[in-house]
Image (cartoon, grey):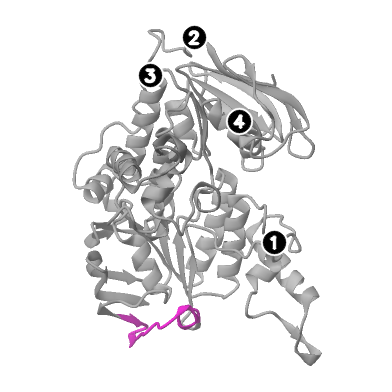
Amino acid sequence: MLVLEGVSKSFGAVAALRDVRLELRAGEAHALVGENGAGKSTLVKILAGAHAPDAGTLSIDGRPLVLNNPADARAAGIAVIYQEPTLFPDLSVAENIFMGRQPLKSGRRIDAAAMRRLAAGLFARLGVQLDPDRPARGLSIADQQLVEIAKAISFDARVLIMDEPTAALSGVEVERLFSVARSLRDAGAAVLFISHRFDEVFALCERITVMRDGQWVSTDPAADLTVADVVRRMVGREVGELYPKERTAPSGLATVGEARLEVRGLSRQGAFHDVGFTVHSGEIVALAGLVGAGRSEVIRAVFGVDRYDSGEVLVDGRPLRRGSAGAAIGAGLALVPEDRRQQGLVMELSVERNATLPRRWALSTLGLLFGGSERRSAQDWSQRLQVKAGRLNNAVGTLSGGNQQKVVLAKWLATAPRVLIVDEPTRGIDVGTKAEVHRLLSRLAGEGVAVLMVSSELPEVLGMADRVLVMHEGRLAADIPRTRADEESVMLAATGQGESR
Protein backbone atom coordinates (compact mmCIF):
# COMPACT_ATOMS: atom_id res chain seq x y z
CA MET A 1 0.00 0.00 0.00
CA LEU A 2 2.73 2.47 1.01
CA VAL A 3 6.32 2.31 -0.23
CA LEU A 4 9.38 4.44 0.59
CA GLU A 5 12.50 4.11 -1.55
CA GLY A 6 15.91 5.71 -0.95
CA VAL A 7 14.61 8.29 1.53
CA SER A 8 17.24 10.59 3.05
CA LYS A 9 16.92 13.59 5.37
CA SER A 10 19.52 15.86 6.97
CA PHE A 11 19.26 18.66 9.51
CA GLY A 12 22.31 20.84 8.93
CA ALA A 13 25.35 18.59 9.23
CA VAL A 14 23.39 15.81 10.95
CA ALA A 15 22.13 13.05 8.63
CA ALA A 16 18.95 11.75 10.28
CA LEU A 17 18.07 9.31 7.46
CA ARG A 18 20.23 7.78 4.77
CA ASP A 19 18.79 5.74 1.89
CA VAL A 20 15.94 4.24 3.94
CA ARG A 21 13.38 1.90 2.42
CA LEU A 22 10.11 0.66 3.88
CA GLU A 23 7.11 -1.25 2.52
CA LEU A 24 3.75 -1.31 4.29
CA ARG A 25 1.20 -3.86 3.10
CA ALA A 26 -2.58 -3.76 3.35
CA GLY A 27 -3.92 -5.97 6.12
CA GLU A 28 -0.57 -6.21 7.91
CA ALA A 29 0.95 -4.83 11.12
CA HIS A 30 4.59 -3.92 10.53
CA ALA A 31 7.03 -3.07 13.36
CA LEU A 32 9.72 -0.42 13.07
CA VAL A 33 12.38 -0.74 15.79
CA GLY A 34 15.72 0.88 16.57
CA GLU A 35 17.57 2.72 19.30
CA ASN A 36 16.74 6.32 20.14
CA GLY A 37 18.36 8.45 17.46
CA ALA A 38 18.05 5.69 14.85
CA GLY A 39 15.79 7.91 12.72
CA LYS A 40 12.39 6.39 13.47
CA SER A 41 10.72 9.64 14.52
CA THR A 42 12.13 11.49 11.50
CA LEU A 43 10.73 8.80 9.22
CA VAL A 44 7.34 9.11 10.91
CA LYS A 45 7.35 12.89 10.45
CA ILE A 46 8.05 12.43 6.73
CA LEU A 47 5.07 10.07 6.47
CA ALA A 48 2.98 12.59 8.42
CA GLY A 49 3.88 15.43 6.05
CA ALA A 50 5.73 17.38 8.74
CA HIS A 51 9.12 16.98 7.00
CA ALA A 52 9.93 16.75 3.30
CA PRO A 53 12.65 14.22 2.36
CA ASP A 54 15.85 15.55 0.78
CA ALA A 55 15.96 12.53 -1.52
CA GLY A 56 13.91 9.43 -2.28
CA THR A 57 10.33 8.72 -3.27
CA LEU A 58 7.01 7.83 -1.62
CA SER A 59 4.12 6.05 -3.29
CA ILE A 60 0.70 4.83 -2.20
CA ASP A 61 -1.22 2.15 -4.13
CA GLY A 62 1.50 2.40 -6.77
CA ARG A 63 0.98 6.13 -7.35
CA PRO A 64 3.63 8.77 -6.51
CA LEU A 65 2.87 10.55 -3.25
CA VAL A 66 4.02 14.06 -2.34
CA LEU A 67 3.26 15.25 1.19
CA ASN A 68 3.69 18.99 1.60
CA ASN A 69 1.96 19.20 4.96
CA PRO A 70 0.00 17.10 7.48
CA ALA A 71 -3.26 17.86 5.69
CA ASP A 72 -1.89 16.08 2.59
CA ALA A 73 -1.05 13.05 4.73
CA ARG A 74 -4.55 12.94 6.23
CA ALA A 75 -6.07 13.30 2.75
CA ALA A 76 -3.97 10.31 1.64
CA GLY A 77 -5.42 8.27 4.53
CA ILE A 78 -2.34 8.40 6.78
CA ALA A 79 -2.98 8.94 10.50
CA VAL A 80 -0.25 9.20 13.13
CA ILE A 81 -0.39 8.58 16.86
CA TYR A 82 2.73 10.34 18.12
CA GLN A 83 4.96 9.27 21.00
CA GLU A 84 4.24 12.56 22.82
CA PRO A 85 0.66 13.86 23.07
CA THR A 86 0.13 17.25 21.41
CA LEU A 87 -3.19 18.45 22.77
CA PHE A 88 -4.53 21.97 23.27
CA PRO A 89 -4.69 22.05 27.08
CA ASP A 90 -7.50 24.61 27.41
CA LEU A 91 -9.87 22.89 24.97
CA SER A 92 -12.13 19.96 25.77
CA VAL A 93 -11.33 16.38 24.81
CA ALA A 94 -13.96 16.46 22.02
CA GLU A 95 -12.66 19.79 20.67
CA ASN A 96 -9.15 18.34 20.52
CA ILE A 97 -10.32 15.31 18.56
CA PHE A 98 -12.21 17.33 15.94
CA MET A 99 -10.00 20.44 15.79
CA GLY A 100 -10.34 22.01 12.33
CA ARG A 101 -13.16 19.68 11.23
CA GLN A 102 -15.90 20.25 13.80
CA PRO A 103 -19.42 19.16 12.80
CA LEU A 104 -21.53 22.19 11.86
CA LYS A 105 -25.20 23.07 12.04
CA SER A 106 -27.17 25.85 10.38
CA GLY A 107 -25.36 29.16 10.08
CA ARG A 108 -22.02 27.31 10.10
CA ARG A 109 -22.12 27.14 13.87
CA ILE A 110 -20.28 24.33 15.59
CA ASP A 111 -22.60 21.49 16.58
CA ALA A 112 -21.24 20.82 20.09
CA ALA A 113 -23.76 18.08 20.82
CA ALA A 114 -22.85 16.15 17.67
CA MET A 115 -19.15 16.59 18.46
CA ARG A 116 -19.64 15.16 21.95
CA ARG A 117 -21.69 12.28 20.55
CA LEU A 118 -19.04 11.41 17.96
CA ALA A 119 -16.25 11.59 20.58
CA ALA A 120 -18.20 9.33 22.93
CA GLY A 121 -18.62 6.85 20.08
CA LEU A 122 -14.87 6.79 19.48
CA PHE A 123 -14.17 6.12 23.16
CA ALA A 124 -16.78 3.37 23.17
CA ARG A 125 -14.97 1.81 20.21
CA LEU A 126 -11.73 1.98 22.21
CA GLY A 127 -13.48 0.51 25.23
CA VAL A 128 -12.58 3.40 27.55
CA GLN A 129 -14.54 5.85 29.64
CA LEU A 130 -13.48 9.45 29.13
CA ASP A 131 -15.68 12.53 29.38
CA PRO A 132 -15.71 14.34 26.00
CA ASP A 133 -16.38 17.66 27.80
CA ARG A 134 -13.39 17.37 30.14
CA PRO A 135 -10.57 19.91 29.51
CA ALA A 136 -7.36 18.34 28.22
CA ARG A 137 -5.33 20.15 30.88
CA GLY A 138 -4.67 17.84 33.80
CA LEU A 139 -5.22 14.61 31.90
CA SER A 140 -2.71 11.88 32.66
CA ILE A 141 -0.28 10.80 29.96
CA ALA A 142 -2.37 7.65 29.47
CA ASP A 143 -5.59 9.64 28.95
CA GLN A 144 -3.83 12.12 26.64
CA GLN A 145 -2.61 9.17 24.57
CA LEU A 146 -6.13 7.78 24.38
CA VAL A 147 -7.38 11.13 23.05
CA GLU A 148 -4.66 11.02 20.38
CA ILE A 149 -5.69 7.48 19.46
CA ALA A 150 -9.34 8.53 19.18
CA LYS A 151 -8.29 11.48 17.01
CA ALA A 152 -6.34 9.19 14.68
CA ILE A 153 -9.03 6.55 14.23
CA SER A 154 -11.65 9.26 13.63
CA PHE A 155 -10.06 9.76 10.18
CA ASP A 156 -10.86 6.14 9.17
CA ALA A 157 -7.23 5.95 8.13
CA ARG A 158 -5.95 3.35 5.67
CA VAL A 159 -2.42 3.71 7.06
CA LEU A 160 -2.17 3.92 10.85
CA ILE A 161 1.24 4.84 12.30
CA MET A 162 1.65 4.31 16.05
CA ASP A 163 4.81 5.88 17.50
CA GLU A 164 5.25 4.45 21.03
CA PRO A 165 1.50 4.61 21.70
CA THR A 166 1.59 2.20 24.64
CA ALA A 167 4.51 3.74 26.55
CA ALA A 168 2.29 5.02 29.38
CA LEU A 169 -0.60 2.54 29.16
CA SER A 170 -1.43 -0.31 31.49
CA GLY A 171 -1.82 -3.89 30.27
CA VAL A 172 -5.60 -3.58 29.99
CA GLU A 173 -5.36 -0.37 27.95
CA VAL A 174 -2.66 -1.86 25.72
CA GLU A 175 -4.89 -4.82 24.91
CA ARG A 176 -7.77 -2.44 24.11
CA LEU A 177 -5.51 -0.53 21.75
CA PHE A 178 -4.31 -3.75 20.15
CA SER A 179 -7.88 -4.92 19.56
CA VAL A 180 -8.55 -1.66 17.69
CA ALA A 181 -5.31 -2.01 15.71
CA ARG A 182 -6.14 -5.62 14.82
CA SER A 183 -9.65 -4.69 13.69
CA LEU A 184 -8.23 -1.95 11.45
CA ARG A 185 -5.63 -4.37 10.11
CA ASP A 186 -8.24 -7.05 9.45
CA ALA A 187 -10.32 -4.45 7.60
CA GLY A 188 -7.41 -3.90 5.19
CA ALA A 189 -5.47 -1.06 6.79
CA ALA A 190 -1.67 -1.01 6.95
CA VAL A 191 -0.39 -0.56 10.51
CA LEU A 192 3.13 0.69 11.30
CA PHE A 193 3.92 0.02 14.96
CA ILE A 194 6.94 1.60 16.69
CA SER A 195 7.79 0.35 20.16
CA HIS A 196 10.68 -0.59 22.45
CA ARG A 197 8.52 -3.28 24.05
CA PHE A 198 9.41 -6.47 22.23
CA ASP A 199 6.57 -8.52 23.69
CA GLU A 200 4.14 -6.07 22.05
CA VAL A 201 6.05 -6.11 18.76
CA PHE A 202 5.95 -9.90 18.49
CA ALA A 203 2.33 -10.08 19.71
CA LEU A 204 1.00 -7.63 17.11
CA CYS A 205 3.27 -7.55 14.07
CA GLU A 206 3.87 -9.87 11.13
CA ARG A 207 7.10 -8.23 9.92
CA ILE A 208 9.86 -6.26 11.64
CA THR A 209 12.09 -3.58 10.12
CA VAL A 210 15.23 -2.63 12.06
CA MET A 211 16.97 0.75 11.74
CA ARG A 212 20.33 1.83 13.12
CA ASP A 213 22.07 5.24 12.85
CA GLY A 214 19.54 6.54 10.32
CA GLN A 215 19.87 3.55 7.98
CA TRP A 216 17.79 0.52 7.10
CA VAL A 217 19.30 -2.67 8.51
CA SER A 218 16.81 -5.45 7.79
CA THR A 219 13.18 -6.44 7.21
CA ASP A 220 12.12 -9.97 8.14
CA PRO A 221 9.02 -11.93 9.19
CA ALA A 222 8.60 -11.75 12.96
CA ALA A 223 8.28 -15.52 13.08
CA ASP A 224 11.88 -15.84 11.81
CA LEU A 225 13.37 -13.61 14.52
CA THR A 226 14.03 -13.75 18.25
CA VAL A 227 14.33 -10.82 20.64
CA ALA A 228 18.10 -11.39 20.75
CA ASP A 229 18.25 -11.17 16.94
CA VAL A 230 16.39 -7.86 16.93
CA VAL A 231 18.50 -6.36 19.73
CA ARG A 232 21.76 -7.32 18.00
CA ARG A 233 20.63 -5.62 14.80
CA MET A 234 19.41 -2.53 16.65
CA VAL A 235 22.57 -1.83 18.61
CA GLY A 236 25.20 -3.60 16.51
CA ARG A 237 26.43 -5.44 19.59
CA GLU A 238 25.34 -7.80 22.36
CA VAL A 239 23.40 -6.08 25.17
CA GLY A 240 24.19 -7.12 28.73
CA GLU A 241 21.68 -7.92 31.42
CA LEU A 242 18.64 -5.66 31.16
CA TYR A 243 18.05 -5.50 34.91
CA PRO A 244 21.57 -5.29 36.41
CA LYS A 245 20.42 -5.30 40.03
CA GLU A 246 23.27 -4.89 42.52
CA ARG A 247 22.69 -6.56 45.88
CA THR A 248 23.52 -4.30 48.79
CA ALA A 249 22.66 -6.97 51.36
CA PRO A 250 24.09 -10.53 51.20
CA SER A 251 20.66 -12.07 51.68
CA GLY A 252 19.19 -10.25 48.70
CA LEU A 253 16.48 -8.80 50.95
CA ALA A 254 15.65 -5.10 51.19
CA THR A 255 18.56 -3.07 52.51
CA VAL A 256 18.60 -2.03 56.14
CA GLY A 257 20.06 1.48 55.87
CA GLU A 258 18.56 4.38 57.80
CA ALA A 259 15.12 5.66 56.88
CA ARG A 260 15.74 8.37 54.30
CA LEU A 261 12.17 9.18 53.14
CA GLU A 262 9.10 8.67 55.34
CA VAL A 263 5.53 9.31 54.16
CA ARG A 264 2.87 9.21 56.86
CA GLY A 265 -0.90 9.22 56.34
CA LEU A 266 -0.81 11.28 53.14
CA SER A 267 -4.28 12.09 51.81
CA ARG A 268 -5.84 14.32 49.17
CA GLN A 269 -9.54 14.25 48.45
CA GLY A 270 -10.35 12.46 45.21
CA ALA A 271 -6.75 11.37 44.57
CA PHE A 272 -5.30 9.21 47.38
CA HIS A 273 -6.01 8.34 50.99
CA ASP A 274 -3.88 7.46 54.02
CA VAL A 275 -0.76 6.55 52.05
CA GLY A 276 2.26 5.73 54.17
CA PHE A 277 5.62 4.11 53.44
CA THR A 278 9.35 4.37 54.10
CA VAL A 279 12.29 4.27 51.69
CA HIS A 280 15.68 3.49 53.22
CA SER A 281 19.15 4.53 52.17
CA GLY A 282 20.45 2.15 49.51
CA GLU A 283 17.01 0.79 48.67
CA ILE A 284 15.01 0.79 45.43
CA VAL A 285 11.28 0.80 46.18
CA ALA A 286 8.85 0.48 43.27
CA LEU A 287 5.41 2.08 43.38
CA ALA A 288 3.26 -0.12 41.14
CA GLY A 289 -0.41 -0.21 40.17
CA LEU A 290 -2.72 0.36 37.24
CA VAL A 291 -2.96 3.73 35.49
CA GLY A 292 -5.23 5.94 37.60
CA ALA A 293 -4.31 4.26 40.90
CA GLY A 294 -2.79 7.51 42.18
CA ARG A 295 0.92 6.72 41.96
CA SER A 296 2.02 9.88 40.15
CA GLU A 297 -0.27 12.02 42.30
CA VAL A 298 1.38 10.69 45.48
CA ILE A 299 4.94 11.37 44.37
CA ARG A 300 4.03 14.85 43.09
CA ALA A 301 2.60 15.59 46.55
CA VAL A 302 5.70 14.18 48.25
CA PHE A 303 7.91 16.43 46.13
CA GLY A 304 5.77 19.49 46.81
CA VAL A 305 4.48 20.02 43.28
CA ASP A 306 0.90 19.40 44.46
CA ARG A 307 -0.57 20.07 47.90
CA TYR A 308 -2.12 17.40 50.11
CA ASP A 309 -4.88 17.69 52.70
CA SER A 310 -3.34 15.75 55.58
CA GLY A 311 -0.31 13.71 56.54
CA GLU A 312 3.38 14.52 56.54
CA VAL A 313 6.61 13.82 54.66
CA LEU A 314 9.94 13.45 56.46
CA VAL A 315 13.44 13.43 54.97
CA ASP A 316 16.16 12.10 57.27
CA GLY A 317 13.70 12.42 60.16
CA ARG A 318 12.93 16.10 59.56
CA PRO A 319 9.45 17.22 58.41
CA LEU A 320 9.32 18.63 54.89
CA ARG A 321 7.32 21.80 54.29
CA ARG A 322 4.27 20.83 52.27
CA GLY A 323 3.57 22.28 48.85
CA SER A 324 7.13 23.52 48.28
CA ALA A 325 9.25 21.92 45.57
CA GLY A 326 12.05 24.30 46.55
CA ALA A 327 12.06 22.90 50.09
CA ALA A 328 12.12 19.37 48.66
CA ILE A 329 15.13 20.15 46.47
CA GLY A 330 16.87 21.80 49.40
CA ALA A 331 16.32 18.64 51.48
CA GLY A 332 17.98 16.51 48.81
CA LEU A 333 14.98 15.25 46.83
CA ALA A 334 14.94 14.98 43.05
CA LEU A 335 11.94 14.17 40.84
CA VAL A 336 12.15 12.82 37.28
CA PRO A 337 8.50 13.36 36.17
CA GLU A 338 6.34 11.17 33.97
CA ASP A 339 5.70 13.87 31.33
CA ARG A 340 9.15 15.07 30.31
CA ARG A 341 7.91 17.62 27.76
CA GLN A 342 5.42 19.43 30.00
CA GLN A 343 7.01 18.92 33.42
CA GLY A 344 10.64 17.93 32.96
CA LEU A 345 12.06 20.25 30.30
CA VAL A 346 11.80 23.75 28.86
CA MET A 347 11.63 22.69 25.23
CA GLU A 348 12.77 26.03 23.75
CA LEU A 349 15.92 26.20 25.92
CA SER A 350 19.21 24.54 25.04
CA VAL A 351 20.33 21.11 26.17
CA GLU A 352 22.99 22.62 28.46
CA ARG A 353 20.58 25.09 30.04
CA ASN A 354 18.03 22.35 30.77
CA ALA A 355 20.71 20.04 32.18
CA THR A 356 21.81 22.68 34.72
CA LEU A 357 18.54 24.40 35.71
CA PRO A 358 18.36 23.07 39.30
CA ARG A 359 22.07 23.89 39.88
CA ARG A 360 22.31 27.39 38.48
CA TRP A 361 23.13 28.94 41.89
CA ALA A 362 25.71 26.24 42.63
CA LEU A 363 27.40 26.92 39.28
CA SER A 364 27.35 30.71 39.63
CA THR A 365 30.05 32.99 40.99
CA LEU A 366 28.88 35.97 43.04
CA GLY A 367 25.43 35.51 41.54
CA LEU A 368 26.70 35.47 37.94
CA LEU A 369 26.30 32.37 35.80
CA PHE A 370 29.09 31.95 33.24
CA GLY A 371 28.57 29.81 30.17
CA GLY A 372 31.77 27.83 30.73
CA SER A 373 30.71 26.31 34.06
CA GLU A 374 27.25 25.56 32.71
CA ARG A 375 28.69 23.93 29.60
CA ARG A 376 31.21 21.81 31.52
CA SER A 377 28.55 20.45 33.86
CA ALA A 378 26.17 19.68 31.00
CA GLN A 379 28.93 18.07 28.96
CA ASP A 380 30.00 15.87 31.87
CA TRP A 381 26.53 14.47 32.47
CA SER A 382 25.69 14.23 28.77
CA GLN A 383 28.75 12.03 28.33
CA ARG A 384 27.89 9.90 31.36
CA LEU A 385 24.38 9.21 30.06
CA GLN A 386 25.46 9.12 26.40
CA VAL A 387 23.07 11.86 25.26
CA LYS A 388 23.05 12.03 21.47
CA ALA A 389 22.90 15.74 20.69
CA GLY A 390 24.57 17.51 17.79
CA ARG A 391 25.51 20.50 19.97
CA LEU A 392 24.68 21.24 23.60
CA ASN A 393 23.46 24.72 22.69
CA ASN A 394 20.76 23.24 20.42
CA ALA A 395 17.19 23.41 21.73
CA VAL A 396 16.34 20.29 23.75
CA GLY A 397 13.16 19.98 21.66
CA THR A 398 15.29 18.91 18.68
CA LEU A 399 16.37 15.71 20.45
CA SER A 400 14.64 12.35 20.19
CA GLY A 401 12.31 11.36 23.01
CA GLY A 402 14.81 9.01 24.61
CA ASN A 403 17.57 11.61 24.58
CA GLN A 404 15.21 14.15 26.12
CA GLN A 405 14.60 11.66 28.94
CA LYS A 406 18.36 11.36 29.45
CA VAL A 407 18.63 15.15 29.80
CA VAL A 408 15.94 15.09 32.52
CA LEU A 409 17.87 12.36 34.34
CA ALA A 410 21.14 14.27 33.95
CA LYS A 411 19.56 17.45 35.31
CA TRP A 412 18.58 15.81 38.58
CA LEU A 413 21.50 13.43 39.02
CA ALA A 414 23.82 16.44 38.86
CA THR A 415 22.26 17.68 42.12
CA ALA A 416 23.65 14.60 43.96
CA PRO A 417 20.24 13.77 45.48
CA ARG A 418 19.74 11.85 48.73
CA VAL A 419 16.30 10.69 47.55
CA LEU A 420 15.70 10.12 43.82
CA ILE A 421 12.06 9.81 42.72
CA VAL A 422 11.67 8.57 39.15
CA ASP A 423 8.26 8.35 37.44
CA GLU A 424 8.39 5.98 34.44
CA PRO A 425 12.19 6.47 34.07
CA THR A 426 12.55 4.34 30.92
CA ARG A 427 9.39 5.35 29.06
CA GLY A 428 10.25 5.67 25.38
CA ILE A 429 13.87 4.60 25.88
CA ASP A 430 15.48 1.92 23.73
CA VAL A 431 16.66 -1.39 25.12
CA GLY A 432 20.37 -0.50 25.24
CA THR A 433 19.78 2.77 27.06
CA LYS A 434 17.21 1.12 29.33
CA ALA A 435 19.89 -1.24 30.64
CA GLU A 436 22.18 1.75 31.25
CA VAL A 437 19.47 3.60 33.20
CA HIS A 438 18.81 0.50 35.29
CA ARG A 439 22.53 0.10 35.96
CA LEU A 440 22.68 3.77 36.99
CA LEU A 441 19.75 3.42 39.42
CA SER A 442 21.29 0.29 40.89
CA ARG A 443 24.65 2.01 41.32
CA LEU A 444 23.04 5.05 42.97
CA ALA A 445 21.26 2.76 45.44
CA GLY A 446 24.57 1.04 46.11
CA GLU A 447 26.05 4.45 46.96
CA GLY A 448 23.34 5.06 49.54
CA VAL A 449 20.71 7.00 47.56
CA ALA A 450 17.10 6.11 48.38
CA VAL A 451 15.29 5.44 45.08
CA LEU A 452 11.51 5.56 44.71
CA MET A 453 10.48 4.35 41.25
CA VAL A 454 7.06 4.49 39.62
CA SER A 455 6.77 2.09 36.71
CA SER A 456 3.99 0.53 34.65
CA GLU A 457 6.32 -2.20 33.34
CA LEU A 458 6.08 -5.24 35.58
CA PRO A 459 9.40 -6.75 34.41
CA GLU A 460 11.11 -3.49 35.38
CA VAL A 461 9.40 -3.44 38.77
CA LEU A 462 10.27 -7.06 39.52
CA GLY A 463 13.78 -6.78 38.12
CA MET A 464 14.87 -3.64 39.97
CA ALA A 465 12.91 -3.27 43.22
CA ASP A 466 13.90 -4.37 46.71
CA ARG A 467 10.26 -3.84 47.70
CA VAL A 468 7.10 -3.33 45.68
CA LEU A 469 4.40 -0.99 47.00
CA VAL A 470 1.15 -1.61 45.13
CA MET A 471 -1.58 1.03 44.90
CA HIS A 472 -5.24 0.39 44.15
CA GLU A 473 -7.79 3.21 43.75
CA GLY A 474 -5.74 5.73 45.70
CA ARG A 475 -4.81 3.45 48.58
CA LEU A 476 -1.72 1.42 49.33
CA ALA A 477 -2.86 -2.17 48.87
CA ALA A 478 0.34 -4.15 49.47
CA ASP A 479 4.00 -3.93 50.49
CA ILE A 480 5.70 -6.94 48.91
CA PRO A 481 9.38 -7.81 49.53
CA ARG A 482 11.53 -8.79 46.56
CA THR A 483 11.59 -12.44 47.65
CA ARG A 484 7.79 -12.71 47.35
CA ALA A 485 7.16 -10.35 44.46
CA ASP A 486 5.97 -11.86 41.19
CA GLU A 487 3.59 -10.80 38.42
CA GLU A 488 0.63 -12.58 39.96
CA SER A 489 0.99 -11.08 43.46
CA VAL A 490 1.49 -7.55 42.09
CA MET A 491 -1.44 -7.73 39.66
CA LEU A 492 -3.77 -9.24 42.27
CA ALA A 493 -3.02 -6.35 44.62
CA ALA A 494 -3.28 -3.78 41.80
CA THR A 495 -6.77 -4.99 40.91
CA GLY A 496 -7.92 -5.12 44.53
CA GLN A 497 -7.89 -8.90 44.73
CA GLY A 498 -4.66 -9.42 46.66
CA GLU A 499 -3.35 -8.70 50.13
CA SER A 500 -4.34 -5.46 51.83
CA ARG A 501 -2.02 -3.66 54.20
Q: Which residues are magenta?
A: 58-74
* Mark 4 or 2: the one toward you: 4
* Gap in angstroms between the C-alphas marked 1 and 2: 49 Å
Q: Secondary structure at mark 4?
A: helix
* Residue 61: in magenta span: yes
**Residue 289 in view here:** no
Q: Residue at x 71, y 72 (%)?
A: 118
- Judged left or right of residue 76, residue 220 is left
* Mark 2 or 3: the one toward you: 3
* Gap in angstroms between the C-alphas marked 4 and 2: 26 Å
Q: Which residue is mark 1?
A: 124
Q: Which residue is mark 2?
A: 256
Q: Which quadrant does the C terminus fall into?
A: top right
Q: Earlier in the sequence, mark 4 or mark 2?
A: 2
Q: Which mark is residue 447?
A: 3
Q: Are marks 2 and 3 in contact (CB under 8 Å)?
A: no
Q: Which residue is mark 4?
A: 327
